[in-house]
Each structure stands twice: as structure tokens, then as C-alpha cells.
Image (cartoon, rainbow, N blue to C red):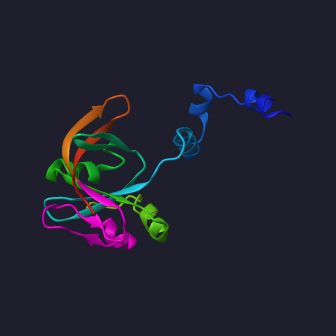
């Protein structure tokens, strides 16, 4: 059979998609947009409690000023990253490398606020004098941002978080 004929046979409508099992649907829809880089976002709250979350929705938004955005999931699903950014106005984005991929992925587990993902997954927080938020020491490419704007997306209770790059390490 020709590939063209096979592709004609593949068709899903919204009712098909809605009927799929939750994780299958999530993985399928996430893969539709193609390759995405995965990064760790490091934050800290005013009490000094660190947080580390894995994100694949990092987007370049401009170079003058140097802006980077990311989509934050609904607060019920991922409350600590966005809460810490709102509180301090600072966060870091850290590239993930094969040497710590499994540890990075484990940061997506739901930990209570008082538990640091850094400690739980075995990654090392790294600080500079001018940015309160922790970097991931093991990352080779990392940058710190200050919060510029959070745009709520009412349709699915997510937010577009926009930050201005302050430091690149």
C-alpha cells in the first residue's frame, strides 16, 4: 500500500480524541507539535523553599528586550512554580542533558511544597549574588529571568509567563 493511501486512512475527530484514555491522549496531543526542548525551571519562595519543575513549553519571545515565555499548567496541577515566581519575581531556566535526564524527569512528580525537588531527585541548587532563584548546577546552559508579565489563558486555566533574561551562565 502506498504511504499516501495509508495517511488517508488515519483520521480522528474531536469525539475520538475525547474518548481516549487520559495519558494516551496527553502523549498523543503533546507529540503533534513536533520536537520540543525540555528544561528545568528553578524557583524559590520567600521562606527559602526551593522548587524545580520540568517544562517543554519554553518559547523565545524577542531579543530586544530579551524575553522568554513558558506555559504554566493549571495551578491545581503545578502550583509551586507559578506561586514562587509571583512571590519573588525571579526564576531560572536550565537545559537538561542526558547525564541527568532521569533525575530531571522525576521532578515532575507531585511533591508537597515543603519538599525540595532538588533534594528529592539529586540535583544541586546553584546561586549567584544577583538572582535569588536557584540554577541547576549540573546544567551546562542556564539563564535567570525576572518576571515581566503573567497572561492568564481562561480557556484551560493555564498561564503564559513572560520573563526578561537577566543572566546567562
Which quadrant is the N terminus positioned in? top right
Is 114 on the left-hand or right-hand side of 105?
left
- Front residue of 137/152: it is 137
Residue 150 in view of the camera:
yes
Q: Quadrant of residue 141?
A: bottom left
- Residue 117 pos. (x, y %): 33, 66
Which quadrant is the C terminus positioned in? bottom left
Residue at the extreme right of the image, as rendered: 1
Residue at the extreme front of the image, as rendered: 64
Going 48% across and 47% down the picture, which residue do you hit? Answer: 36
Q: Which residues are magenta?
A: 116-144
- Residue 24 pos. (x, y %): 59, 44
Q: Quadrant of residue 62?
A: top left
- Above or below 140: residue 22: above
- Residue 123 pos. (x, y %): 36, 72
Residue 72 in view of the camera:
no
Amino acid at each position: 500500500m502506498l504511504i499516501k493511501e495509508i495517511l488517508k486512512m488515519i483520521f480522528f475527530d474531536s469525539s475520538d480524541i475525547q474518548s481516549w484514555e487520559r495519558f494516551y491522549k496527553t502523549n498523543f496531543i503533546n507529540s503533534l507539535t513536533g520536537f520540543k526542548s525540555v528544561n528545568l525551571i528553578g524557583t524559590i519562595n520567600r521562606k527559602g523553599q526551593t522548587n524545580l519543575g520540568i517544562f517543554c513549553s519554553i518559547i523565545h519571545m524577542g531579543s530586544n528586550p530579551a524575553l522568554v515565555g513558558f506555559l504554566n499548567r493549571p495551578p491545581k496541577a503545578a502550583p509551586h512554580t507559578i506561586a514562587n515566581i509571583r512571590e519573588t519575581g525571579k526564576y531560572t531556566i536550565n537545559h537538561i542533558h542526558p547525564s541527568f535526564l532521569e533525575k530531571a524527569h522525576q521532578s515532575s512528580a507531585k511533591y508537597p511544597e515543603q519538599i525540595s525537588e532538588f533534594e528529592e531527585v539529586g540535583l544541586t541548587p546553584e546561586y549567584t549574588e544577583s538572582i535569588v532563584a536557584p540554577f541547576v548546577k549540573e546544567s551546562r546552559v542556564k539563564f535567570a529571568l525576572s518576571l515581566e508579565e503573567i497572561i492568564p489563558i481562561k480557556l484551560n486555566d493555564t498561564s503564559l509567563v513572560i520573563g526578561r533574561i537577566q543572566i546567562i551562565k
